Image (tube, grey):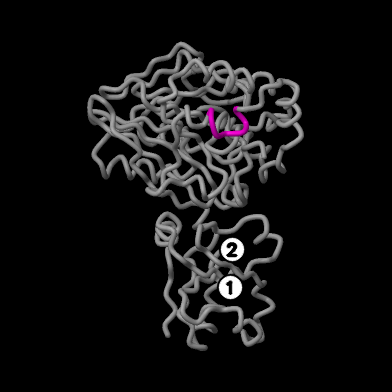
Amino acid sequence: MAVREMHASEVARNVIEKKELFILDVRNEADFSDWKIEGKKFKYYNIPYFELLDGIENIMGKIPENSQVLVVCAKEGSSIMVAEMLSEAGIDVAYLKGGMKAWSEYLEPVKVGKLKNGGELYQFVRLGKGCLSYMVVSNGEAAVIDATRMADKFVNFAQEIGVNITNVFDTHLHADHISGGRKIAELTGATYWLPSKDADEVVFEYEALDGDNEVLIGNSTIKIHALYSPGHTIGSTSFIVDDAYLLTGDILFIDSIGRPDLAGMAEDWVGDLRESLYTRYRDLSDELLVLPAHFMIIEELNTDGSVAEKLGALFTNNHGLNIEDESEFRRVVTENLPPQPNAYKEIRETNMGKITPDEEKQREMEIGPNRCAVK
């Protein structure tokens, strides 16, 4: 049997459509345990490729005979070698083109809804990293919100649907991934917006989000003035689009809430986090569709691949929104923090414009799962 390459886009369809796939991951055990391709019906076997250099006979009993097998490694080289050996043994096998690096960078665009006066709102799902970015499209114009560093993906998508990107926003200064916001603005001539309270150390020009902005995109208004929502960072800002969609950044997720410690300020910011979630958000309509900047687990994906839920449903089902005692909230938030994201200090400095790593270094800095939420 011939070995074929499977692109990240095909793996993404398997994830979204909840198809079965057997993944033979030939990275080191620690890398696999920390971060792998997640799928509702995926099955896995992990063995480092160097243990297979003398042959695959010892693992043949672990490989299903009547299932599509995908071999995965960091960059694809080792997976090609192992896939070829499996193919020679009669296994229907593919390898992941570009390896986990390609999976980390893949974006799946999903239309999450229409706007009242024409236009659409798209969510870009970064399945390998848990990042969620957005594009608001109206009357030939577009705004991009919380873009990942793969700026060309957003620029190309806008060109494909025939719109011009006029504004780019970051809800806060990100610490888990490198923002593509400034790059998109440079490529398109768009205005780049950043909360000024997160920008004390940035070394580039930006338009300040200070709590009283309303930005018109085509026929739709992104309302910002009432939604200063600190807690994850001191400048965290939520957006309401078209009086229907609430973009929460990293303050509120579908199954969890944001962590307040990525600038070393957990004890100081946990009170802000509670006020944003328990006071500011309580004043909003339960019918707003919450669109966060990250998801934590694959179960948060809806049937169309989107990550979204009504605010009212989250106030009922999200444990982080149902801790009535303030001291208990403080304890839960500060004592249930996951490990810091990989290279988060360098990522923050990159997003400030203080350092400019090359493309390969940026890829390395982002390797691993997102860790923006309280457990």
Residues tagged 1 and 2 counted as in contact (Cβ below 8 A)? yes
Q: Mark 2 packing: few (<14 Cα in 10 Å), some, or many (20+)? A: many
Disc 1 target residue: 78
Whether residue 265 can be seen here: no
Q: Is residue 129 magenta?
A: no
Residue 290 at what x, y percent from top left? 45, 31
Q: Nearer the viewer, residue 59 or 147?
A: 59
Q: Nearer the viewer, residue 301 or 72?
A: 301
On the image, the x and y values in percent for residue 38 come to 54, 57
Residue 74's disc number: 2
Q: Quadrant of residue 1?
A: bottom left
Dominant SS in magenta: helix
Is residue 177 shown above or below 280? below
The answer to whether one can see residue 270 in this image is yes
Range drawn in magenta:
315-321
- Left or right side of 176 for 131: left
Coordinates of residue 276 in the picture (x, y in percent): 58, 20
* Label 1: few (<14), some (14–19) or many (≥20) C-alpha neighbours in 10 Å: many
Residues at marks 1 and 2, CA–CA distance in whole angstroms: 8 Å
Position of the C terminus by quadrant: top right
Image spot of residue 108 (x, y percent): 40, 49
- Front residue (pair 351, 47): 47
Amino acid residing under circle 2: Ala
Name the residue at 36% across, 21% down.
Answer: 243
Left/right placement of residue 120 relative to residue 34 reads left
Give me the residue at 43% from left, 49% from top.
107
* Amino acid type assigned to the residue bearing label 1 in the image: Ser
